Amino acid sequence: MANKTKKMKKLSLFIFFFGITSTGFCQLKSRTFEEVDSLQQIQKRKIIVFIHTDWCQFCQRMKATTFKDQEIIEKLNSDFYFVDFNAEEKREVTFQKQTFKYLPSGNNVGVNELALQLGTIDNQIVYPTLCVLNEKNEIIFQYNIYLSTKEFKILLEKLTK
């Protein structure tokens, strides 16, 4: 009888873990620019850069909704390199053999040069900004407004064609 109970426990655990993985509790893989540089050497992909700040409400909403959608997560993980980039990143960032620094603009306020380079549209940077780079790391798309889950899925569809 004890042997049968052990088998039932093992079967229950197997079903539990299989259930978790098959329902797709998939995490969005966010890369650094340094990682993307290395990964592009192995496999070329488009890069999607989500440029945001901690204080931007629309940025936080996109993080809580759009980037939590399982379909979006799976598409980003399989077809793109995704970079979640805080525009106010104070550490130096190296991308394409170039170093980008934090530019202070006031008391504990500033922006990283790379955020400016990738996120500036019509001479200003607005958050959130989505920047898509092709396999040669050239900007092919910029958008600086909140994107809902539905809108983001449409964008991903267009980018994979």
Image (cartoon, helix red, strand yellow):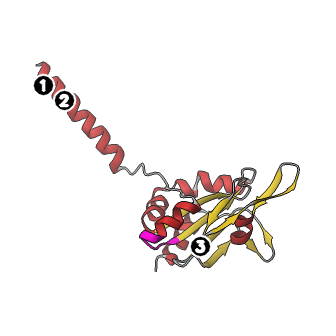
Dot 2 surroundings within 10 Å: few (below 14), some, or many (20 or more)? few
At horizontal 74% and vertical 61% (from top left) the residue drawn is 101
- Outermost residue toward the right in this view: 106
Q: How many marks?
A: 3
Is 22 on the left-hand or right-hand side of 142?
A: left
Mark 2: amino acid? Met
- Outermost residue toward the top in this view: 2
At horizontal 62% and vertical 77% (from top left) the residue drawn is 141
**Residue labelled with disc 3:** 132
Is 11 on the left-hand or right-hand side of 105?
A: left
Q: Position of residue 13 (x, y in %)?
A: 27, 34
Residue 28 part of the magenta-drawn span: no
Q: Which mark, by number, is residue 4?
A: 1
Mark 3: amino acid? Val
Mark 1: amino acid? Lys
**Residue labelled with disc 2:** 8
The answer to whether residue 54 is above or below residue 158 is above
Magenta stretch, residue numbers: 41-46
Dot 1 surroundings within 10 Å: few (below 14), some, or many (20 or more)? few
Dot 3 surroundings within 10 Å: few (below 14), some, or many (20 or more)? many
Query: In the rendered image, which quarter is residue 137 located in?
Result: bottom right
At horizontal 25% and vertical 33% (from top left) the residue drawn is 12
Q: Name the element at disc 3.
A: strand
At horizontal 44% and vertical 69% (from top left) the residue drawn is 79
